[in-house]
Amino acid sequence: MRAVATAAMKLVASMKRDWIQTGRRPSGVCGAALYIAAHARGHRRSKADIVRVVHIGEHTLAKRLYEFSHTEASALTPGAFDALNRSLEQHGFQ
């Protein structure tokens, strides 16, 4: 679970760099990051599971996932995403 939480935090940072979080409620961004991180780490959770945990609507989750799908980060494998984040952290980006 720690790996999922860490990956979700890095995804939120990526969404912030891509301006997805601007003007959005944090719960929707966090829900999308949690859903993506869980799947990337092999934990199959349904959208309904995430909706219950973060208290958002399925439509909101779907919108945040759609927005993330249009970023360059969405095309990366989990390993490549982790490598990119390590590189950004070394250079002082969050």
Image: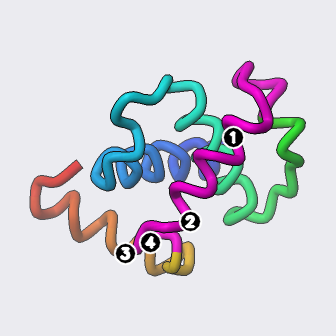
Name the residue beneath numbered marker 4: 81
Q: Secondary structure at mark 3?
A: helix
| Residue 69 horizontal side relative to residue 55, left or right | left
Q: Secondary structure at mark 2?
A: helix
| Residue 84 horizontal side relative to residue 50, left or right | left
Name the residue beneath numbered marker 1: 61
Q: Which amino acid type is shown beneath numbered disc 2?
A: Ser
Counting residues from the N terminus, which is met first, the one under dot 2 or under dot 4?
A: 2
Real-space Cα separation, disc 3 to disc 1, in angstroms: 26 Å
**Region of the chain picked out in magenta, as a range:** 51-74
Asked whether the residues under the numbered discs 3 and 4 touch, taking CB atoms below 8 Å apart as contact, a structural biologist would say yes
| Residue 88 horizontal side relative to residue 6, left or right | left
Q: Position of residue 50 (x, y in %)?
A: 78, 36
Disc 1 residue crowd, few under 14, some 14–19, many 20+, Cα 10 Å: many
Q: Position of residue 70 (x, y in %)?
A: 49, 67
Q: Is residue 25 above or below residue 8?
A: above
Q: Secondary structure at mark 4?
A: helix
Q: Which amino acid type is shown beneath numbered disc 4?
A: Phe
Labels 3, 2: front one: 2
Scheme of image coloration:
rainbow
Real-space Cα separation, disc 1 to disc 2, in angstroms: 12 Å
Most common SS among magenta residues: helix
Residue sitting at x 83%, y 44%: 47
Label drawn at residue 69: 2
Q: Which amino acid type is shown beneath numbered disc 1?
A: Leu
Real-space Cα separation, disc 2 to disc 4, in angstroms: 14 Å
Real-space Cα separation, disc 1 to disc 4, in angstroms: 21 Å
Counting residues from the N terminus, which is met first, the one under dot 3 or under dot 2?
A: 2
Counting residues from the N terminus, which is met first, the one under dot 1 or under dot 4?
A: 1
